Amino acid sequence: MPITTCIFDAYGTLFDVAAAARQAAQEPAHAKLRETWAEVAAHWRLKQLQYTWLRAVMDQHADFWGVTQNGLDWALEAAGLQGDAALRQRLLDLYWELQCYPEVPEMLAALRTGGRQTAILSNGSPAMLDGAVRSAGIAHVLDDILSVESVGVFKPDSRVYDLVGARFGCAPEEVLFVSSNGWDAAAASCYGFRTAWVNRAGEPVDRLPWTPDTILSDLTTIPAEAGL
């Protein structure tokens, strides 16, 4: 069955989650971050994800913005920067303006030109996602932005993936689901989507019963994966 709909995770897939810490570290006011920004960015992302998984299995949902702040607080304390309120606020402000990866606009435009439906499916709250999409200037090449807030549970709960068929009226086999998270791609494969894992860091494949259909180093060839 041909691909009709291309669905993208947001953070780490379309948007560079390390960009906030990297940019803040370059600013004179936050010189203390220069030596540890990469560690802070990695810990921030890891804790953000871990907290979503824990909340999902414990049935204790919270807005993703609160989870994002919790993850940052852990990361800053781990780096010995927990007392810097100005740095914390700057990092949070920058998270609403994350840069997209350089190949993203052209890739999404090619999908739309080729007649594919395109959307984001993310743990992010609607306001966070709208801010990132506007900042990146990619709203015109997306058909929709789908947030887990409409079902009140984080990925990889199947109710999140159900949002795609409900919105676009497509069968799972018609969907190419793209994520930078190996576990997300694996779960989407289990659900029935065709999947592409964008493995920019060259990480090993997760030891799960399901594996991505395709592993890529960036998003450049997604139109070809969609049959264009």
Image (spheres, helix red, strand yellow):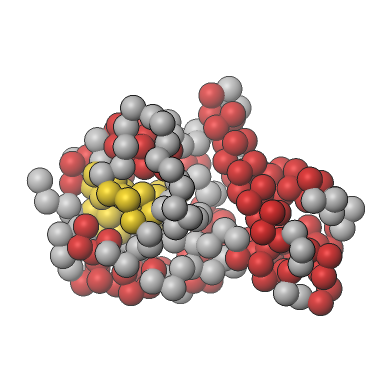
Residue 124, x across and y down, in percent: 53, 49
Dividing the picture into quarters, in which one does residue 151 lie? top left
Q: Residue furthest right?
A: 83
Dividing the picture into quarters, in which one does residue 161 lie? top left
Residue 106, x across and y down, in percent: 33, 74
Q: Identify whether 175 is placed above or below 222.
A: above
Question: Residue drawn 46% across and 47% down?
Answer: 203
Question: Residue drawn 33% across and 56% down?
Answer: 216
Residue 74, x across and y down, in percent: 75, 43
Q: Residue furthest top?
A: 58
Q: Identify whether 110 is placed above or below 121.
A: below
* Side (left or right) of 34 relative to 121: right
Question: Residue drawn 71% across and 61% down?
Answer: 37
Q: Nearer the viewer, residue 105 or 31?
A: 31
Residue 12, x across and y down, in percent: 49, 55
In the rendered image, the quadrant that contains the C terminus is: bottom left
Q: Is residue 184 visible?
A: no
